[in-house]
Amino acid sequence: MSNKRSPTMRQLSTFVYAVVGIAVIVVGWGVWKSLPSNSGAPLEDETTSAFVSGLAPDFSLTVFDTGETITLSGLRGQPVILDFFASWCPSCRVEAPGLQEFWQAYEGRGLTLLGVALNDSVEGLRDFKDEFLLTYPMGLDETGAIAAAYRVGGIPTFIMIDREGRIANIVVGGMSNDAMTVEAEALLK
């Protein structure tokens, strides 16, 4: 017979918990590093730096409550801020009242704020718009084609487009009214 003792169940379970804990930390870190920043700072990496200052992809969006179709090319000559959002998104809900205030301040100055809803429904949009008394135009990106054209990986994402139709800036994550004002004033110059 051998004098070697086999590990107890307690020792084995402690070992398994330690290995699983380390695996969760490693996988979580990897996922966290692969996500875009949620700081509201401009998104700058190799894949988007060439995208910024390029011509913004044209699209058509039907404003859900009026049926009006808006095309980006039809807005040429005026700056546009695209807000990619969803009615169920917690960050989007928090910033909705501020976006309405922003829209009221800039609507008459020749700037367009256009909400582009992702993974949403007309009923969700209607409830969202009614709850926050939103008046800026918004529509549903039903197929995800607009988001794909703009490389939107998360919401909220804001795309600033200048008068010539070029992408001036991309911000991933929520934006304060102060940050929106800075972006708007830069676009209006």
Image: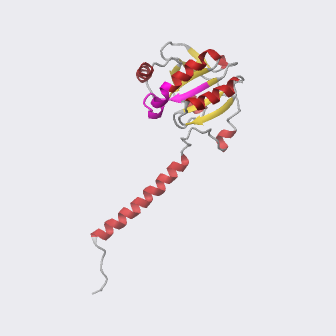
Tell which residue pokes out farthest to the front in this image: 178
Give residue 128's quadrant in the image.
top left
Residue 84 covered by magenta stretch = yes
Quadrant where the C terminus lies?
A: top right
Q: Position of residue 89 (x, y in %)?
A: 45, 32
- Nearest to the observer: residue 55 or residue 179: 179
Q: Is residue 100 above or below residue 148?
A: above
Q: How is the image coloured?
A: secondary structure
Residue 118 in view here: no
Q: Residue at x 47, y 15 (%)?
A: 65
Q: Which segment is the magenta one?
A: 81-97
Q: Position of residue 71 (x, y in %)?
A: 61, 18
Q: Is residue 136 above or below residue 8?
A: above
Give residue 1's quadrant in the image.
bottom left
Q: Position of residue 24 (x, y in %)?
A: 43, 56
Q: Residue at x 61, y 25 (%)?
A: 81
* Residue 107 falls left or right of residue 53: left
- Nearest to the observer: residue 146 or residue 82: 82
Give residue 51's quadrant in the image.
top right
